[in-house]
Amino acid sequence: MAERPRIGVVGGTGAVGTVTLDLLRTRGYEDVRVFASARSAGRVVGGSTVEEATPEALARGDVDLFLFSVGTSASRELVPHAVRGGAVAIDKSAAYRLEPGVPLVVPEVNGRRALANDGIVANPNCCAIPLTCVLKPLHDAAGLVRVRVATYQSVSGAGAQAMERLRSEPQEEHDLRMDWSFDGEEFEEESKLRDETRKILELPELPIQATCVRVPVMVGHAEAVWIELEDELPADRARSLLEAAPSVRVEEVPSPGKARGGDEVHVGRIRRDPTVDRGLALFLAADNLRKGAALNAIQIAELLFAGRERAAA
Amino acid sequence: MAERPRIGVVGGTGAVGTVTLDLLRTRGYEDVRVFASARSAGRVVGGSTVEEATPEALARGDVDLFLFSVGTSASRELVPHAVRGGAVAIDKSAAYRLEPGVPLVVPEVNGRRALANDGIVANPNCCAIPLTCVLKPLHDAAGLVRVRVATYQSVSGAGAQAMERLRSEPQEEHDLRMDWSFDGEEFEEESKLRDETRKILELPELPIQATCVRVPVMVGHAEAVWIELEDELPADRARSLLEAAPSVRVEEVPSPGKARGGDEVHVGRIRRDPTVDRGLALFLAADNLRKGAALNAIQIAELLFAGRERAAA
């Protein structure tokens, strides 16, 4: 597997799946097969003929690692078959993220957790990935006390059909939306962002609240963040820590447009929060289809490939 | 003046000026003249021929009240001439807002300040108006300790040309922008929102920080707000206070699209901030051209008309 891993992309025709195939090709992976629903089977995507993602096809044992980019219910149904066939499944859906024993991994933050898997590694929510990339070095330096986040999430996070709807909607009708399931107090996206950030940072009690908003931008998520810290951390020192952090780029004023198509989490507007002692405000942006989804999953896969190489050596 | 006030709209061809004329007509004002730059003079807008806004024309004394919807430098130049001619000027620009002695008025919040003017009443920033409408009843009930705001501001706030640019920009290129002047730490819009909120609420030391973001929505601003209070204020009680507040409508999930074309500030997502004691989170939206600008200015004018009626009675 280490030398020439056999990779399967499940959901290869969707918004994230397409980017996954593109990134795999760019990174030189050759043995890549594409799986999707019966509706898409037979189509040719990125030079590969799409195979139907049946339980039998996934359990056949001829793929080392599956990258799943399908909805939560499809993941629940199909991932166990891939694992039964002996493959590792990296799952982008919310199906397994909070399951005890399933590692939820951002390689730069808690990559060492990836190898301790029982066949499933979960890929976090598209806002939790860039947020934890930025929070981790600040927490290590000064201890997080509380976090508040207002998100600006692009429509591609809702999938290819939502992108089509936005394209066909007159500009005058574009609106902010909160298009997630709602319990009357909190949107599911907000509880995901809270619970996943806690799990990734291994801070199960971290006080954190999010207000999640969909904006009529096609690709690229942004987050306005306020944090409070245990210890004094001047804004300049926070900026230096973030400049040194892996996969983070410090910019004066980040935006989804600047982050689009790139691999890094852009962070800027790093400044004191004058309303409180030991508070900082910042603004971050990332390509939600890449670092927020497909790229992060591939980076997890590469941790596994490298781990097995080391084990085999 | 009280019976049939003679009104002049300066900047009547711009994004806010057009809405101002529309609202004046709807409210039954008949003696309305339109002034604009030489470039627009002679055009017919809403049935009126546009007159050039020269110092002489504004100082002529044949208008009781001017509504100014022009840029800050044009206001600085022209407003004194209107006042010299004996008119009251309600100015929408930032030119006079923070000047000591000039009332900065949101009728529902500090309307009693409007009559104590020396010829100029300033109309606040489009985000400060809805924010103070929502903060005022909460402050009166429980005392504001600190406020944090992340804004989602529509492109119409940047004027008619910015709206045209957004219309002609391909959807794929739409981005979040921070298109205000920047001192390296804070955007001018953020300092306006802080300083004006303090002045309107008459809380000159209120700890408040804003992150202001332009979103590719045409009309309607939104704000994600976190507040902390001196006294306990359960979310249910906050909701009741806001339901009783003038010009405020409580909605489960507000959005710019729902607020567009209406006169009220929509507020919702009113919930406890679990990261802190006595904290609340909420989300608000308002039509920035109406309550955020033109409507608020007309409501100020109506306070003045009513005040003079009372004085004359």
Image (cartoon, coloured by chain):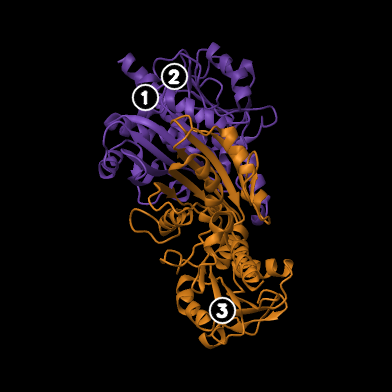
Chain colours: A purple, B orange
Residue behind mark 2: A103
Chain under label 1? A
Tell whether B6 sits left or right of B292. Answer: right
- Foreground tag (3 vs 2): 3
CA separation, marks 1 and 2? 9 Å
Chain under label 2? A
Tell whether B87 sits left or right of A42. Answer: left
CA separation, marks 3 and 1? 67 Å
Q: What residue type is labelled 2?
A: Pro
- Foreground tag (3 vs 1): 3
Of B219 and A274, nearer the camera is A274
**Marks 1/2 same chain:** yes
Q: Is label 3 in a helix, a strand or a loop?
A: loop
Disc 3 crowd, CA 10 A, few/some/many (<14, 14-19, 20+)? many
Of A61 and A69, nearer the camera is A69
Residue behind mark 3: B87
Residue behind mark 1: A110
Task: Tell me the quarter of the picture where residue B68 sits.
Answer: bottom right
Residue B95 image point, x, y percent: 45, 69
Looking at the rendered image, the quarter that the N terminus of chain B falls into is: bottom right
Residue B39 image point, x, y percent: 57, 82
Of B206 and B154, nearer the camera is B206
Residue B171 image point, x, y percent: 58, 53
Residue drawn at the location 59% of the way across and 30% of the way down: A11
Residue drawn at the location 48% of the way across and 73% of the way down: B118
Task: Tell me the quarter of the picture where residue B293 sits.
Answer: bottom right
Residue B5 image point, x, y percent: 67, 76
Looking at the rendered image, the quarter that the C terminus of chain B falls into is: bottom right
Mark 2 and mark 1 in contact (Cβ < 8 Å)?
yes
In terms of sequence position, does the residue under pointer 1 or pointer 2 come before the other?
Answer: 2
**Marks 3/1 same chain:** no
